[in-house]
């Protein structure tokens, strides 16, 4: 049994796996993360390994001092990955993006793969059918777009995420919702068209904190799975054991 941990820019996500089966998913903030991890370990005493990927600077040393019976493995850019990294600056590529690319490569062999992660940032990652990772795009996530409009203007209020009723926003709040949500939907659908035009044989995966909110507005060819990064972490770990 393993515990995978994804430290994102905003929150931490964890999942307990027995083989490929996800038994439990946990979301928690960065304060008290050790306490939260200890709770999971108590509930699932069969956990033998913790697999961590982090895009944030967070001190896991403290955790290894508390749990000395469990092995803690860090997935880093030096780990073994099932694709050839063609990014021009491989050292600056986010580890979350590498893990997503690895999961897509392992789960969907011999086809083009596009992974869209709608989290704090929206990332697009493309692995072609010859297992070359080519790159993609980084743009602001939904929450970030709402916050940016508020933080960099005098008059715009900070709104909570809400589905716009119409693309024509007839008042300030409706205009913001349309700009943020419809804007991202158009962006994602536009990218999907660009990547699909490269080759018909493509799998498009949507993941991240805004998966369920966005999925109903996107082209129905996508495969929505908000656990894809946590599952990919488990698969990247299995791959690392065999190949490192
Ligand atoms: N409690 C919450 N805190 C923050 N974001 C939330 C929350 N609930 C839903 N969300 C949505 O999730 C999005 C952030 O996604 P996610 O939680 O995957 O980000 P993250 O933890 O920073 O991970 P990553 O850095 O991998 O994107 C926000 O745009 C927001 O709309
Ligand atoms: C883009 C984010 C912030 C998404 O979590 C992360 O993958 C990251 O910090 N990336 C580094 C820059 C890059 O991937 O090229
Ligand atoms: K992200």
Image (cartoon, helix red, strand yellow):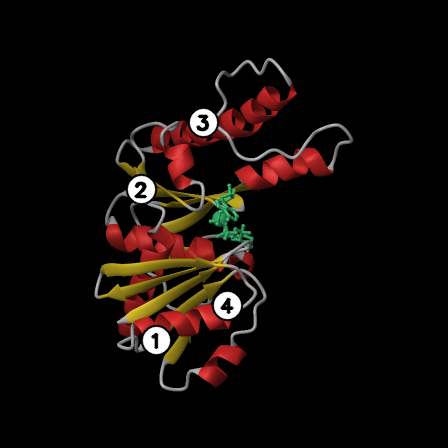
Measure the alpha-carbon separation of dots 4 and 3: 38 Å
Measure the alpha-carbon separation of dots 1 and 2: 41 Å
Measure the alpha-carbon separation of dots 3 and 2: 17 Å
> Of the residues tagged 1 and 4, which is closer to the observer?
1
Mark 1 nearby-residue class (10 Å; few <14, some 14–19, many ≥20): few
Point 34% across, 51% down: residue: 228
Q: Earlier in the sequence, mark 4 or mark 3?
A: 4
Residue under numbered circle 2: 112
Q: Is residue 58 above or below residue 232?
A: below
Which of 72 and 136 lies nearest the eye of the viewer? 72
Q: Earlier in the sequence, mark 1 or mark 4?
A: 4
Instruction: Find numbered disc 2 in the image and state the secondary structure of the residue it sits on.
Output: strand
Instruction: Find numbered disc 3 in the image and state the secondary structure of the residue it sits on.
Output: helix
Locate residue 221: give its quadrant: top left
| Numbered label attached to residue 190 | 3
Mark 3 and mark 1 residues within 8 Å of each other at the beta carbon: no
Q: Earlier in the sequence, mark 2 or mark 4?
A: 4
Measure the alpha-carbon separation of dots 2 and 4: 36 Å
Locate residue 180: give its quadrant: top right
Measure the alpha-carbon separation of dots 1 and 4: 14 Å
> Of the residues tagged 3 and 2, which is closer to the observer?
3
Instruction: Give residue 183's position: percent from left, percent from top.
Output: 53, 26
Quadrant of the rendering where the C terminus is positioned: bottom left
> Of the residues tagged 4 and 3, which is closer to the observer?
4
Q: Which residue reaches farthest right?
A: 154
> Of the residues tagged 2 and 4, which is closer to the observer?
4
Tally the numbered discs: 4
Q: Is residue 149 left or right of residue 37?
A: right
Beta carbon at label 4 within 8 Å of ligand 1: no
Point 56% across, 26% down: residue: 177
| Numbered label attached to residue 42 | 1
């Amino acid at each position: 049994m393993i515990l995978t941990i994804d430290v994102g820019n905003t929150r931490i996500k964890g999942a307990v796996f027995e083989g490929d089966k996800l038994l439990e998913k946990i979301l928690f903030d960065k304060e008290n993360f050790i306490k939260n991890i200890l709770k999971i370990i108590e509930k699932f005493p069969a956990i033998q390994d913790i697999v961590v990927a982090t895009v944030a600077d967070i001190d896991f040393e403290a955790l290894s001092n508390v749990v000395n019976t469990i092995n803690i493995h860090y997935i880093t850019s030096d780990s073994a990955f099932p694709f050839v990294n063609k990014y021009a600056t491989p050292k600056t590529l986010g580890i979350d993006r590498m893990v997503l690319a690895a999961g897509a490569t392992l789960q969907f062999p011999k086809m083009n793969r596009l992974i869209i992660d709608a989290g704090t940032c929206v990332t697009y990652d493309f692995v072609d059918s010859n297992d070359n990772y080519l790159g993609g795009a980084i743009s602001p996530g939904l929450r970030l777009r709402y916050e940016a409009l508020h933080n960099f203007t005098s008059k715009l209020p900070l709104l909570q995420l809400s589905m716009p009723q119409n693309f024509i926003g007839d008042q300030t709040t409706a205009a913001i919702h349309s700009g943020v949500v419809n804007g991202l939907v158009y962006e994602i659908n536009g990218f999907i068209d660009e990547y699909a035009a490269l080759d018909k044989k493509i799998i498009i995966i949507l993941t991240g904190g805004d998966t369920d909110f966005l999925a109903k507005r996107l082209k129905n060819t996508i495969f929505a799975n908000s656990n894809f990064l946590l599952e990919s972490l488990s698969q990247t770990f299995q791959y690392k054991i065999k190949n490192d």
